[in-house]
Amino acid sequence: MAQREIDKKLEEDYLNGVITRYDLPRAVDGEVRFEFDEDMVLPFEYNENVSDLIYVETEYCESLNRFFQNHKGLRLYQMYRFIYLPNLIDGYGVSEQRKYLSPQLDRDDVKIDIDSSYPLQYLWYEEDKKKISHGMFLFISNCNNRGARFIQGHFYPLNEGSDEDVIRQLDDIVKKAHSEYSLGGLYSTIQKPDIEEGAAEDYADQLFSWTLKDDEVAILVEEVRERIKKLKEKGIAERLLLNLVKDKLKFSRLIITKDMRIILPDFHSMEIEMEPINKAVFLLFLRHPEGIIFKHLPDYREELAEIYQKIKPLGLNERAIRSIEDVTNPCLNSINEKCARIRGAFISKFDEDLARHYYINGNRGEAKKIALPRELVIWE
């Protein structure tokens, strides 16, 4: 049987559950290149302009640990960074980031420990740990072993020595990594639909996913973008922090007060603030757990106006009426702008994994809805 046929049979067996990933032949050599579970959370975002080499060790090496502790932020070339995991947490004020990821927390300060052996718990093959002493790992994502996805780690040994010796070794490692891999970001070939506003009754629906995913289109308030940017610039990816603290996803009840405020009592009585028209749209969708199809928005114009009047009893002026008409017109992009701002109001307060249950979402051609279980919604 040809190797291609063997690989195809193995892939079919793996995908059908006949065999496990441990029954698959290695995809890489297991000496220099290693297979890691795709669930491993790395402390960086993939970026076409920057590549990260992470220090990993199976046994504690005093001199190498001291080197990285004394050389925080070491960078020999513009597009390469060296990551020493304990430095990400050491002296790092995690309270703001921690509360952003887990807003139900009671404590402001939480101790988080991580050491340089962290990635090794995700090795596919336990015996591979014996082949690694201490050195730098370059991780490559989006790899596939006969149907089993994995992260590939290329290991570059690093030996003890003077600071000059270690820097010289790191310089050689960077040059090797650069010559061995074509490193860069992945570019999507999917383009934003090129349609003219007002040209079709499903115009808003066609652009919905683009408006939510593309910050340039989404018109998310500047404060939201700045907050998230600052979180990422702390040097540790939100996903890694979330993985380390291992809090279960916990929803808060959502209270709509008599004066139409949005309160999350289980997140320390957090208030979600929005402009009146955005809040009216949010409350309209909250009223309809079955969701609303965008091309049917004109049917909800009167109800939206009623909600708006409760938010702004004296505010239904000509400008407000025009906003209500625009947002319920599926031939315009107004509803997408409002949904983007509603999303921004939540992700400015807490992580997207939680926030997506609170803002309006849905697939093209389907009803858009708020996923939060309605037993958690309280209307005063």
Image: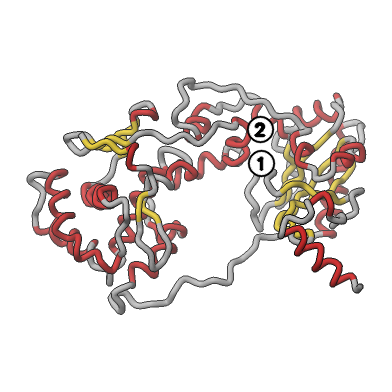
Element type where label 1 sits in the image:
loop
> Quick one: label 2, few (<14), some, or many (20+) residues within 10 Å?
some
Are the residues flagged by discs 2 and 1 in contact, CB closer than 8 Å? yes
Residue located 71% across and 59% down the image: 16
Residue at 42%, 57% in the rendered image: 212
Report which residue position mark 1 lands on: 43
Give the structural element (helix, strand or loop) at label 2: helix
**x then y, percent, for residue 265:** 34, 29
For this rendering, which residue is in front, 169 or 248? Answer: 248
Residue type marked 2:
Leu
Quarter in which the N terminus is drawn: bottom right
Report the front residue among 51 and 313. 313
Marks 2, 1: nearer the viewer: 1
Measuring from the top left, give residue 175's x and y in whole percent. Answer: 84, 53
Please say if 118 is above or below 178.
Answer: above
Q: Position of residue 6 (x, y in %)?
A: 86, 68
Q: Nearer the viewer, residue 56 or 368?
A: 368
Q: Position of residue 49 (x, y in %)?
A: 66, 56
Q: In the rendered view, would you say 186 is above or below 172?
A: below
Cα separation, mark 2 vs mark 1, equals 9 Å
Is residue 337 visible in the rendered structure shown here?
yes
Where is mark 2, residue-wise? 88
> Quadrant of residue 224 in the image?
top left
Rendered image quadrant of residue 178: bottom right
Res. 148 image quadrant = bottom right
Earlier in the chain: of badge 2 and badge 1, it is 1
Which amino acid, by three-letter code, is at mark 1? Pro
- Tell me which colouring the rendered structure shows: secondary structure
Left or right: 116 in relation to 298: right
